[in-house]
Structures are given as C-alpha cells and as structure tokens.
Image: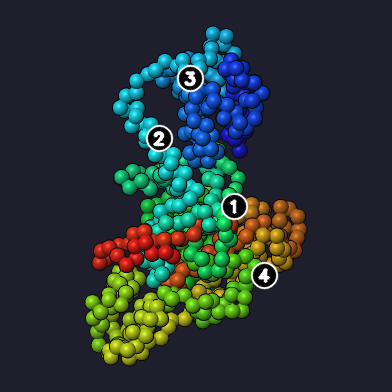
Amino acid sequence: MVLTIVFLITLIPFHVGLWKLFEKAGRKGWESLIPVYDLYVIQKITGKPTYWVIAALFPGINLIVLAAMLVNLSKSFGKFTTKDHVLAVFFYYIFIPKWGLDPNVVYISPDKLPLRKKSQVRDWLEAAVFAIVAATIIKTYTFEAYKIPTSSMEETLLVGDFLFVSKLNYGPKIPSLPLTFPFTHNSFRDIPVGLPNVKSYVDWIEFPYTRIPGWQKIKNDDIVVFNFPEGDTIIVDDYLESHSYFDQTRKKADSLRSTDLMMGIPVSPTPTYYSKARKLITDKYDLSFRPVDKRSNYIKRCVAIPGDELMIKDGELFINGNPQKDIEHKQYRYRIYLNSEFTLKKLMGMGINAEDQDDGRGRPQGGGMRNYPLTMSQVNALKAMPNVDSIARTVAPREFAAINITFPHSPNYDWSMDNFGPLKIPAKGETVKLDTMNIALYSRVITTYEKHVLEIKGDKIFIDGVQTDSYTFQMNYYFMMGDNRHGSLDSRFWGFVPDDHIVGKASMIWMSSGEDGVRWKRIFKLI
C-alpha cells in the first residue's frame, strides 16, 4: 500500500514534465493529463505506431511497452545515450520534468532524428522483446498451456496430457501483480533450464481483482483450472511446497490425537492439537505467503455452482436433489478378490497403469486382494475375467469421518469423502444465517477470501467488531471434484473455490505422452 501511494505521488512531477515536453513538440500541454490519450500523443510525437497504446493497457506487458515509449520520448528530445534511456525509465519522475523545464532541451521531429544503424544484436533484442510481449498477451488473456501432473482427473485426463486452457470463456483476469518475470508463474523454476526455486515476482504494485467479461459462465460439470485456494500459505521445502500447509497441519493434528488415543492419554480439545501441529511444522520449516494469482494451478470438474445444494451419499453425487449426470471416465476405488494372479500386460491394455496397481506407497499390492481405481467399463471387464472372484466399490461411511481431514474440519460435521453434505454453495449477494454450528462452513470465506475479521465469543459471532447472526457473500463460489473420486484432493477436503481464483476452462489436449510413449489418439482431442 505504501509503495502504491509513493508510485502515485511520482506521477505528479512526471506529468508536469510531460506537459512541458508536449508544448515543446507543438501539442497542447493539457493532453498530458488525459489517461491513455497521453500515450497516444507520445506515439504521435515520436513517430511510432499508435497501436502500441493498446498493448500498454495490458498489465504484465505494459511495463515493457511503457519503458519503450519513454526511451523513444527521450530520443525525440535529443537524449540518445544508454544512460539517458536508463534515467528516463527508472527515474522518470526526476528527468522528464528536468528535461521539460530545461530551455536547452528542444524537440526533434521524427523525420529529423539522426539515423542510427542498428546492430545485429539490437535487431535480435527487439525481436525478442516483441516475442515476449506477444507471448505474454496470449498467455495472460487468451490461452495458456497446462500439463496434467497428477491422476486426480483420470480417466478423463491422464498424467502427461498437455492442455490448452481458454481464459476467454469465463473472461481473463487482469494480473494483480504486473511485476512478474515473463514465462513464469511464481518461481524462476517454471522456466525448465535449471533455474533456482526463487520467487519470480514482486508485490510492489498490486491491482484489485478485475475480470474482463467472458462469453459464458461456469456450468455444472465444466472442467476448470483454478488457483489452489489453500495455496496462500506454503511450506518452504522443495517437496512439501506442492502440498497444502493446512492439510499437513490437519494430518499432523490427527496423528497427534490418534497417538494420544493409542497411548490411553486423555484426548485434548481439537484446537490444542492444531496448535501443537502448527508449532511442529513452523519449528522445522519456514512459511511463505502467495497472493491469489501466484497460487498453484489445479484442475478439477466443477460439480456445483453458486446457489446449488450438494450432497454425496455412499459416493454418489447429488446436486439439488438430482444425481450428477453420468461421467463416462469417472473412477472409484474397488476391492478385487482373486483366485489367481493378474496378467500385467492385460491390465495395462485395459488402462490400469502401474500407478493404479500400486498401494499408494510405491509397492505392488499383494495377497489375493487388489485395490484399484476403476471406471465402470473396467469394472465390467474385470468381472468377466475367470480369476476374479468378486469386486466391490470402497465406500467411506460417516462413522469413519476424520474431522481434521474432511471439510469443514469441525466436530459439528461427520462428513467423509463418500458421505458429505448437504452443503449450500455460496452465491454473490446471498445472505446466510450464522451460528456456532455452521460458522465452520464459512469462516475461511469470511476471513481469507473476503478479508473480514471474524471473532467468536461464546455463542456470539462478531464480524469486523459488530455482533451479527448473518452474512452476505461478496463473491460467487464453486465446488470442485476430481473424476478419480478416491484419488483426488479437492473441495471435499479444502472447501469452496472463490470466483477470483478461477483461471480458465480446459479446452483441448494438444499433446499426450505416458509410460508407453505418445498417446496419438488423444492429440487434438477436445475436452
């Protein structure tokens, strides 16, 4: 905030100098005070293409374009050295007014500027800058490439699928942090040339959440890419960074509680275990905060939209009382009892890969029982095999609920991944009644996503210091689930996805490769 105020203050002397430079160039001084139009005038003065003004409106690449404009402006007033150009870009609030007020600095029209032969290095540099600007506009506002890293969406999307994610469908977000190194998301490691895992952005300037209107709203069962809601706090560790800090804390708290039970130690209140778990993690690791746009990208199916009521009964999903439409490649985990061993090659041919044949810890499953994630077509194929005695879907009943693991992480709710809800999805402008029972559902919405101060004192709820029994949502929210229902870390574990976290819609698989090489049938497959 302080840096933003300082930046705005520097614009005052800058525009004073711009007024004087415009007058020297035969323009009206007041033209320097009109946003966007002043950039158009700079382009006319310097003889450069006016379409640059459009590029200057796109956060993320506008800094490059504005720097180029300042360099060209300085040339039009006789400042040709590299030193002059650096001063114009980085100290615009000092040298633009200095040159504007200096009677010895005069305007040189574009046709009278001295011709300077471009070196080959400069030609390449200008081409590279143009390529960076063009690629950044495409990546930020239209389509972005995305690789499927986990099996949470199998068999719909496979590990090794490369997607194009459309940002036009729901409308592209204006980047909140324009000072980001090109071609990176949140780390220099995003550029695959061995760069270090160091933050690739700075938060000196931060814009409020703004989205350009798209041509559709998110619909039920759209496959959506979004910023991970629990990715605001990360553990500074190369392995744990990709895991949710809050999930790690909940698991550690659950482990501490289980240990007390096993040892016959009286169980403490739940907050006590959370406090111990947080301390154990923070004593061992540093924590770091990431703003919304820089949180990791996740991809899931949007199963419920604002205003929907969601319910999961024995693994079956219901929206507003109706079963979810059939998802062809949806997977559940099944227990398979055998009378003889499977043929590995046959399983691979059915799409049950090496990861599916694993017990989750890198070991093959043993004995006469197997535990595989399967689609319904795979289940039917296995049932027809003579070495299969029986096959049954795994279901987590409510009595097996782990409150530290499953949303909303409260003893008031006995929800499991297969028996969950009913849960109403918040909609913008909708008001919900609050009490000490249901506050767990909305506490993160109120505090983290919508930036209010929440306090609970006895049976009373205070928001921003005012006692209340209701809350009106400021954003729309969504509920996301993976098609691999027993192999997906999704909204059943961390709750709602806010509207400002939505990145785009998965549109097409442009490349796919796996254990057996390129999957030719999946290339250019629409999603």
Q: Nearer the viewer, mark 2 or mark 4?
A: 2
**Which image quarter holds the N terminus?**
top right
- Residue at the image point whose x is 59% and y is 79% from the top: 322
Whole-Å distance between the Cαs marked 3 and 4?
71 Å
Q: Is residue 395 visible?
A: yes
Q: Of the residues shown, which amino acid type is indicated by label 3?
A: Pro
N-term mark: 3 or 2: 3
Q: Residue 405's x, y, as percent? A: 50, 68
Label at residue 326: none
N-term mark: 3 or 4: 3
**Residue beneath disc 2:** 129
Q: Nearer the viewer, mark 1 or mark 3?
A: 3
N-term mark: 1 or 4: 1
Q: Secondary structure at mark 2?
A: helix
Q: Nearer the viewer, mark 1 or mark 4?
A: 1
Q: Of the residues shown, which amino acid type is indicated by label 4?
A: Met
The answer to whether the residues at label 3 and label 2 have Cβ atoms under 8 Å apart is no
**Residue beneath disc 1:** 213
In this rendering, the answer to whether 213 lies above or below 104 is below
Q: Residue 295's x, y, as percent? A: 48, 52
Q: Is residue 277 visible?
A: no
Q: Quadrant of residue 357?
A: bottom left
- Front residue of 282/187: it is 187
N-term mark: 1 or 2: 2
**Which residue of the protein is positioned furthest toward the top in this rendering?**
104
Label at residue 110: 3
**Residue beneath disc 4:** 437
